[in-house]
Image: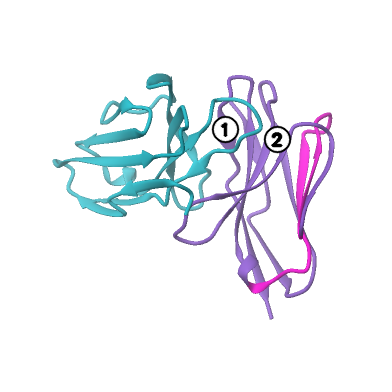
Amino acid sequence: GQNIDQPTEMTATEGAIVQINCTYQTSGFNGLFWYQQHAGEAPTFLSYNVLDGLEEKGRFSSFLSRSKGYSYLLLKELQMKDSASYLCAVRDRDYKLSFGAGTTVTVRA
Amino acid sequence: ETGVTQTPRHLVMGMTNKKSLKCEQHLGHNAMYWYKQSAKKPLELMFVYNFKEQTENNSVPSRFSPECPNSSHLFLHLHTLQPEDSALYLCASSPNLGGSETQYFGPGTRLLVL
């Protein structure tokens, strides 16, 4: 099976930067995804990494190091609407997605 | 709005009831999935269908029975459930099993078993 760890909660101020770390152990690696999930809503796709390095999409960036089994999601210029749960998910060699328990980010004014 | 719809959005059932959850996508995707999301726990993959064929049953109890009549529709039939089955059940679809394409999730069915 897979083992995916991420912090349970993080709090930051509006306009600040927050970095959510994710470590994983997997049987084969076929990509890492980050999703955002607001309370009571469906998870929505934020980013995908399959090669080492940084992927930037507007205020959100995601980094991957396959040798370290490590990724992070960087949220810049935080807005109140960014308060949500952020899910790290790893796809294995059989194309199954395994999720972390999610990191609840609270943005304060 | 992801293009994946689920009905009902909320469901309360007794342990002796039989009910079904429905998922529908008109995105032209070939793969569909059922996940269970319990409070404070990771999403758990339950079933995977690829081109209407079940490719994954993640050790799910037989009281959960999936059905995929075509590539646009996915059902989860429920019978004699237990209170610990109360959770959010999410359906997802993707163009194919692999590639860089993400899975698109429906809004989920919030299930309460009494």
Amino acid at the residue labelled 1: Leu
Percent x, y for residue A56? 80, 50
Dot 1 crowding, Cα within 10 Å, few <14, some 14–19, many 20+: many
How far across and down, in percent of the image, does residue A86 sit? 62, 53
Q: Neighbour class for label 2 at 10 Å: few (<14), some, many (≥20)? A: many
Task: Return the chain for callout 2.
Answer: A
Residue A34 falls within the magenta-colored stretch: no
Residue marked by disc 2: A24
> What chain does badge 1 belong to?
A
Residue closest to the eye, B40 or B7: B7
Task: Tell me if A32 is positioned left or right of B47 in this view.
Answer: right
Q: Position of residue A36 (x, y in %)?
A: 60, 54
Q: Which residues are magenta?
A: A59-80
Residue found at x 59% / y 38%: B102
Quickly name the residue at label 1: A97
SS state under label 2: strand
The answer to whether A62 is drawn above or below residue A95 in the figure is: below
**In the image, what residue occupies the spot 40% across and 40% down?**
B25
First along the sequence among labels 1 and 2: 2
Of the chain colours in the picture, the one used for chain B is cyan
All told, the count of numbered labels is 2
**Image quadrant in which you'd find residue A80:** bottom right
B109, A59: nearer the viewer: A59
Residue B63 on image: x %, y %: 25, 31
Q: Nearer the viewer, mark 1 or mark 2?
A: 1
Question: In the rendered image, what is the letter of the chain coloured purple?
Answer: A
Q: Outermost residue, left direction? A: B16
Q: Is residue A72 magenta?
A: yes
Residue at x 24%, y 36% (from the top left corner):
B78
